[in-house]
Amino acid sequence: MSENDVFSALNIGSGLNTTELIQNLLLAERAPKEEKINEKIEENEVSISAIAELKNSVSTTTQTISSLEGTNVFEGSSTSTAVSLEVNDPATVKEMTNTVEVSELASSQTLVFDGFTSESASVGSGTIYFQKGSWSNGTFTADSNYSQQLVAVPASSYGLTDIKDRINNANIGITASVVKKDASDYALVLRSATGSLNSFKIDVTEGDNSGLRKLEHTSYTADTSSIASQEGAAITSSTAHGFELGDTVQYIAGSTALTGLTSLSSYTIATIPSSTSFTLTDASGNNITYGGGNGSANDSFLRTNTETASAKDALFKIDGVSITRDTNTINDVIDGATLKLTTTTTSSANISVSTSKDKVLQALKSLVEEVNTLAAELSSLTERGLNGGERGALAGDRSIIAISDRLKKLTTEPILGYGENPIYLANLGVTTTKSGGLKLNERTFDLIFEQDPQSLTSLFTDRLHSTSSLVKPFLTGSTYKPGYYFFDIGTQATFTGSAPPSDISSSAYTPAVGSQSLQITLNGTQSGTINVTGGPYSSTSSLITALESAINADNTLAQAGESVKVSFANNSYTITSTKYGSESTIVLDSIDSGLNNYLGLQGGTVVDGTGNETGASLSDSSLEQTSSGGFRTLSGDAFGLSLTVSSPGSDAYISIGNSYLSTIREYLEEILSSSGTLNTKTTSLNNEINEANIDLEELDKQIENSRQRYKKQYGAMEGVVNSFKSTGEFLTNFTEAQNKG
C-alpha cells in the first residue's frame, strides 16, 4: 500500500485514490505514443514480409530467365562423329546444308626428348633458341613475322622440370611438359600449335654444364666431299654434330647424293668416333658405303628421333571445294558457325544449320509470362488503394516503385549490338501493356521468324562478334555499352635489308672493335651508337638475338619507350618497330661495313607504319597497345573491350550485344544482391524496427519518471491537505473553547 493509500485508509489527507489516479494519468500519457510506435513496427514487419515474398518471386523469375538464356534460334548438326557444327554467332548464321570430307587433321609438331632418369634430372645449362616457321624436305624456313625466341638456362638451375617451367613461362607458343614413361625414364615433351606454319626449330648454345644440346632439333651440315669409298666410313666435319648413339637422322642430299644414301631416308647413328664424326646403318642394320668425292658441303642430316608428330594443316572439302586451315576448329568458313574436325572421313558427312520455331516460340511465351507475373506482383504491392481499392503492403514505397518503373523501361529500350540498327521488342512481335506487362503477337512473330530469324537472337543470346577473323574481341570488364564499333588497326614500320654479302652459317661472325656499330632513328628518336658485341655468331638466330638486344638496350631509345623486333626470312634481316601507326618509322643512319657484311642492311627497304598512333582508332575512346600486340579501350562507350590482332592493317566492326534476357537477369540479380534494392530496403526497415523498440524502452523510462514525479507531487499534496486538516481541527477546538468560556 502506498503512502497516499495509507493516508486514505486512515482518513488522513484528501481521501482521494491517488494510486488509481496516477495510473490513469500514466496510461493517458503512454497510450498514444505506444500505439504510434507499435503501428510503425507492425507496418514495417508487414513490409518486410512483403519484400521477402517479392525476393522469392524475383529469384524465381531470375532462375526461369536464366534457363531461357541461350535458347537456340539456330542449331548446327552433323551426320558423322568425324565433324561437328556449332552455331557461334546466331546473328549472322543462316540455314544451310553442306557436305564435308576430311582427308587430314591439323596437328602440332611434337618433340619428345627421353632417357632422363627422374623428373628433376640434370640436363645442361646454356641458351635454347626457338624459331617459328615450317619444315619441308628437311629444310626449315623461318616465319618472317616472328622473331627468334630464347630461353636461358642458368648453371644454377638446369633440371628437367626447371627447363619445362622456363619454356612455359616464356610464352613463346611452345607448351612443355614432363612425362613419366616408366620408373627410370622421363621425357620432356614440346608441342606447338597446330598448322604447318607453326612448326619450330630448336638451336642450342651450351653453357658450362654440357648436355643441353640433346634438346636440339636442327639439321647438321657435314663436309662430305672428301670421304673415301669404304664401308662404315665416318662422316666428318669441323663442327660438333650433337648426335647421340642410336639417334635416328634423315639424310638430305645437296646437289649430289652420297653413294649408298637415299635423300630424305632415315638412318641410325651406329657409332660416334668423335663429336665431329659419326657412322650410319640403314633400317636393316647394314653398314653404309660412302663414295669418296661424291658429296658436297650442302649434304645434311636432320635428327628426327625426337619428333613424334609433325605440324600439319587440316585438309578438307566442303561441297567439293578443297580448303586448308591450320586448326581443327574452323570458324571462318561458314558464317556464324564453327566447324570442328575430329577424325578423317571415309565418306561425306552432311552438316546443316536449322531453326526450331516451336522451341523459340515456347521460350518467348515463357518470357512474357514471367515478366507479366512479376509486373503484376509489383503493381499489387505498390497499389495506393484509391477509389476503394485494396492498398498494397508497399504502397508509396519509392524504391519498389522504381523497380517496377525500370522493368517497364527495359521493355521499351532498344537492344543494341546485333547489327548497325537497334532492335525493339515491338519489332519481334512483343508489345507492352498499360500495366507494364508484355503481350505477344504470334502473327508478327511468325512473320519475323520467316523473314529475319537472326533478329530473334537478340532476345536470348549475348553477342561479341568481329567482322574480321584477324581481329578477335574479348571483354575484360563490364562497363562497356552494347553497340557497333569500328576499329581501324594500324601497321608497324619495317626496315628490310638485302641478302648479306657473307653467309654466317659458313663463316661465323665475330664483331671486331671499331667495325660493329650502327645508329638508327626509331619512331622519331635517334639512338646513340649501338654496338653489337660478343660472338662468334655462327647462326642467323644467334645474330638476331644479339642485334635485337643491342638496339633495345640503347639508353636513348629505352628512355623514349621505343623498341624493335628483329627477324630473318628470305635470306634477309628485318627490323620491325613495336609501335603502330603513322608515327612508326625506322631510318638506318649509319652502319659499319664489317657489321653490314653479315646483316646486309645498307640500302634496305623501309615501309612506314600507317594508321592511328596508338595502333588502332575508335571514336569516343582512348586506346592502349598491349604487350601481346593487341589493344584495349581505356575510356568511352567501349571501355572494357580488348582486341587481339593477327595481322596489322586490318579493319573490323565489333558488335557487343546484351540480349533482352541477360539485361533483365542482370538487373534482377542486382536487385537481389547484398547491396541491392530489396536487401537495402529490408535492412532499413529492420533498423527502423530496432529504433522503434528503443523508443519503447525510452517510453518505459519516461513513464517511470512520470510515475515518480506524480507520486512525489501527490505525496506533497496529501501533506498539505493533512496540515490543513490539523489546522482546521485546532481552530475548531479553539473556537469551541472560546464559545464555552
Image (cartoon, grey):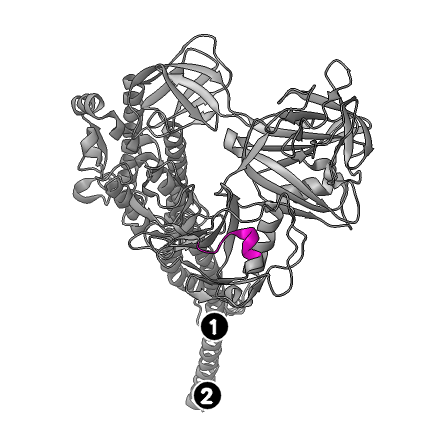
Which quadrant: the C terminus? bottom left
Q: Secondary structure at mark 2?
A: helix
In the displayed structure image, the side of residue 112 where residue 367 appears, left or right: left
Magenta extent: 595-603
Please tell me whether residue 411 is drawn above or below residue 286 in the rendered image: below
Helix, strand or loop at mark 1: helix
Q: Residue furthest front?
A: 293
Q: Residue 711 placed where, x, y %?
A: 49, 70
Q: Quadrant of residue 65?
A: top left
Q: Nearer the viewer, residue 716 or 10?
A: 716
Q: Residues within 10 Å of mark 1 (few under 14, many from 20)?
A: few
Q: Which residue is mark 2?
A: 734
Q: Is residue 496 magenta?
A: no
Q: State left or right for residue 169 relative to residue 209.
A: left
| Residue 602 spot, x, y in % from top left | 47, 56
Distance (Cα) linking label 1 and label 2: 37 Å
Nearer to us: label 1 or label 2: 1
The image position of residue 191, as x and y in percent, is 61, 32
Residue at (18, 41) in percent of width and height? 388
**Left or right placement of residue 151 versus residue 421 in this view:** right
Count every numbered label the image shows and give the total.
2
Position above or below: 581 against 142: below
Residue identifier under label 1: 709
Inspect this view and state whether residue 424 appears. Answer: yes
Q: Amino acid at mark 2?
A: Phe
Q: Is residue 663 above or below residue 574?
A: above
Callout 1, which amino acid?
A: Arg
In this rendered view, identify the residue nearer to me: 705 or 507.
507
Residue 217 visible at all: no
Q: Residues within 10 Å of mark 2 (few under 14, many from 20)?
A: few
